[in-house]
Amino acid sequence: MTATEPAIPAFPFATTGCPMDPPALLGELREDSPLTRVTLWDGSRPWLVTRHADIRASLRDPRLSSDVRLPGFPFLSAAQAEAIGESLITFIRMDPPEHTRQRRMLTQEFVVKRMETMRAEIEATVDSLLDEMTAKGAPADLMEDFALPLPSIVICRMLGVPYRDHAYFQQRSQMVQDTTAAPEEVNAALAELAAYLVRLAGEKAAEPGDDMISRLVTEQETPGHLSRHEVAGMALNLLIAGHETTANQIGLSVLALRQNPEQWDKLCANPDLVPAAVEELLRHQSIVPTGLQRVAREDMEIGGTTVKAGEGVLLQIASANRDPRAFDDPDHLDIERTAHRHMAFGFGVHQCLGQPLARVELQCALAGLLRRMPGLRITKTLEELDFRHGGNIYGLFSLPVRW
Ligand code: HEM
């Protein structure tokens, strides 16, 4: 590097300052250098994109690929890169037309109408978890006693996975998400999860039930549209996406509201604001700290900068959600703002398939806590709390509360 060349920062960035805000460097780059190169663990130098408009345009652009098999795909750790060869590549890591074909097999499972029919059941699950918490008495760990079990119970029911096995797959799925884990550990966790789900799909083939894995086996595997391995891969993807994400979003949302007590009080006084609050919390608190990974299939321009074929691109949705060009006073949490242009669920063809489910879960979780525990308080300071740094999903290991 010559003296005039700007330094290329290492990515992922360390969390600096408030753990509830994206790293300060992201905000600086968004203003001064919205497309900039960063250095990854393997020395590769993908582009980091930080502005809302550039990210939105990129996620709509078919020249940016999600295919992990293409050279130049920006893996965030050795474990991620090595695990890919062995792992079950699902449609989240594919491009159309195969992506479209596989995603369509699941769209009916997550349509808004279907999720709304599950609302009463999700509310009942919220109530029974809060009953258990109340019966045990304060203090409690909101993550362990509420935020993790809620989405986990729901996705298990939908998939037809026995919830009694949750410790087994939760531990392994956390390992899969951990960018600091050794490749052998991630591969072992993936292999065990895959074997578990292949076995379960076999049981469903013999005796189908009213669940997603059974439908994938009978409607897709039996006619030859998917292999057993692909069914297991889809189930694995949903099992991981289905609980880690929403669980951490619940934890961060509750924490953000308690950090802004006037917003919590406003919600207690007017629970009709819950759906808008959920959107604002999705905007303000990102559980995807490393952003979305893509690789350019051909030379293209992003925000006026040329990105060459084979170069990696990291789209920072946490930064997009705090871009002052898209949101007024973006660092301020305001549950009454209209935050619907947030990109917490991504955008374009890969936009989160489970978002109707996540929304219902987040709304029911928040409404239940406000109704049953209006005096909820967190018993540790921000500095004392145990945040999940270094993974693909940000959040909290635990959240001690009293009410
Ligand atoms: C707060 C909760 C959630 C957040 C913030 C979230 C976020 C995201 C994001 C940002 C993407 C886009 C990835 C990309 O473009 O590369 C995505 C995709 C996806 N999500 Fe979610 N998600 C959440 C909950 C869920 C749930 C509950 C499920 C299912 C049970 C789910 C299933 C999926 C699937 C299958 C994809 C891949 C879609 C595709 O590639 O076509 N997510 N999610």
Image (tube, rainbow, N blue to C red):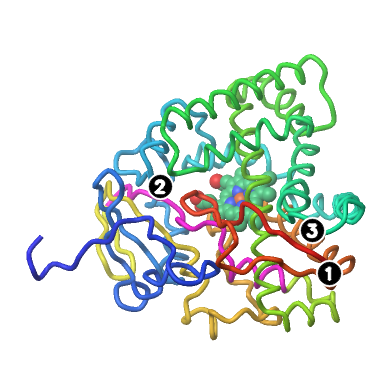
Residue to which mark 2 is pinned: 65
Which is more N-terminal, label 3 or label 2?
2
Q: Is residue 333 left or right of residue 12?
A: right
Q: Is residue 13 left or right of residue 148?
A: left
- Quadrant showing the C terminus: bottom right
| Circles 2 and 3 in contact, beta carbons < 8 Å | no
Residue to which mark 1 is pinned: 370
From the top left corner, tell me how far across and down residue 100 is, in percent: 56, 42
Q: How many marks?
A: 3
Q: Residue at x 76, y 17 (%)?
A: 203
Which is more N-terminal, label 1 or label 2?
2
Q: Between marks 1 and 3, how big is the CA–CA gap? A: 17 Å
Q: Residue at x 27, y 58 (%)?
A: 307
Q: Between marks 2 and 1, how big is the CA–CA gap? A: 42 Å
Q: Which residues are magenta?
A: 277-298
**Numbered tag placed on residue 139 in the rendering:** 3
**Which amino acid does the dot numbered 1 rest on?**
Leu
Q: Quadrant of residue 343?
A: bottom right
Q: Residue at x 50, y 33 (%)?
A: 89
Label 1 SS? helix
Residue 351 visible, this orientation:
no
